[in-house]
Structures are given as structure tokens and as C-alpha cells.
Image (tube, helix red, strand yellow):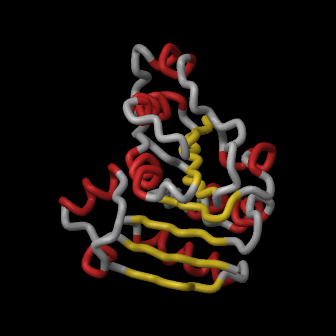
Amino acid sequence: MRMRNPKDKDEVINSCDFFYDEFKDDKPIHLEIGMGKGKFILEMALKYPQYNFVGVEKYSSVASVAIKKIREVKPKNLKILIMDAQNLGDILEGKVDTIYLNFSDPWPKDRHAKRRLTSRNFLESYDKLFKGRPHIIMKTDNDRLFEYSLESFKEYGYKINKVSYDLHSETQDNVETEYEEKFSKDGIKIKYVDVSK
């Protein structure tokens, strides 16, 4: 369910001074598609200052919540975009080292499969974003989306570097999203895959 527009959404967005333009250094760029309320991308930027991070969110109402959160610390290695992921090539062509797909909409109906962020048409659109070797890391709570994604990655020529059907039982070094925290507390196992070509 989509969240309601915060009353101060426009003011927050208009006053944001960390929209993506260009980074002033050549650190590797890590991109989260569908950053939601920004917890993951902000914590990653703080934890890994040796990388630059870009968070993309399609919905301005959600992005405004992320902006408030990021504005409190404003790390220099984090910028955001409010746009549809399919248009990212216009801005980030040949610049991205790693893409994160965290708890993307599963689009459960078969007729909506092309909307999944791991469908062939999205994987094709990511190709132009990568600077070098394509690298994607995905986390989800949804079993069907996970199985679909594993097949989609393989069919598109990705090699699976690491896969987990219960991430939290296997690693302590994990930055969680808001959804991930909630699902974990409810006892739902988090699925994880790291792929590259």
C-alpha cells in the first residue's frame, strides 16, 4: 500500500541539496533502486566512506521521508534521485559499479512479470548503467520473486556468487532496510543473492 503524501513533502523536496549531479571524486558508485525511506542507503554511505552511493526512489512521498532522514547527517558520499528506474540511463550511463535491489515490489501476477526489477527488460536497462563488470545484490522476503529472479539472472548470463535462503542466520555483517527489520521480527527469512557477469 502506498503511503499518503506528507504535508511538507514539496517543501522537503524543494529544499533538498543532495540530489545527484556528479560526485567530485572517482570512488566506485553503488546504486540502490527503490531506496524507500532511505535507511539502507544512508547506513551504507556511513559505513563505507570509500564508496559513493546513489539512492533512487520513484515516489516523491516516500523520497521526502528519506530526505529528512539523510538531511540529519548529510554524508558527502550520498546523493538521491526521484525518478523511474527505467530512465536511469539518461543520468548514470557507464557510472555504476554495483546495483542493490532491496525488497522490490514482487508483482505477483504473471501478466505483470515485466514490471519486476529483475525481469529481462530491466536487466537490459541496467547494462548501460554499469561502468565495468555488472554486479547486482538483491534481498527479498518473497519466495516466488526470489526463484523468478534467480532464473532471470541465470538466463541473462549472470553468475551467482553467493545465495542465501536465510541471510540473517548466516551473517552478522548486514545493513538492514526498514522492511527487512519488520520481516525479520515477524520470523520471515530473508533471501539474498549476489550476481555478476
**Residue 195 left/right relative to 63:** right
**Residue 134 left/right relative to 48:** right
**Residue 166 left/right relative to 104:** left
Where residue 152 sits in the image (x, y, percent)?
A: 63, 76
Determine the residue positioned at 43% across, 30% down.
Answer: 71
**Residue 72 left/right relative to 151:** left
Determine the residue positioned at 70% across, 66% down.
Answer: 123
Dividing the image into 4 quarters, which one contains the N terminus? top left
Between 72 and 24, the one nearer to me in the picture? 24
Determine the residue positioned at 41% across, 31% down.
Answer: 65
Where residue 58 sits in the image (x, y, percent)?
A: 58, 39
Between 26 and 160, the one nearer to me in the picture? 26
Where residue 61 sits in the image (x, y, percent)?
A: 48, 28
Does 133 appear above or below 163? above
Does 192 appear above or below 58? below
Dividing the image into 4 quarters, which one contains the C terminus? bottom right
Q: Quadrant of residue 59?
A: top right
Does 144 appear above or below 66? below
Total marks in image = 0
Determine the residue positioned at 65% across, 37% down.
Answer: 20
Where residue 112 sits in the image (x, y, percent)?
A: 61, 57
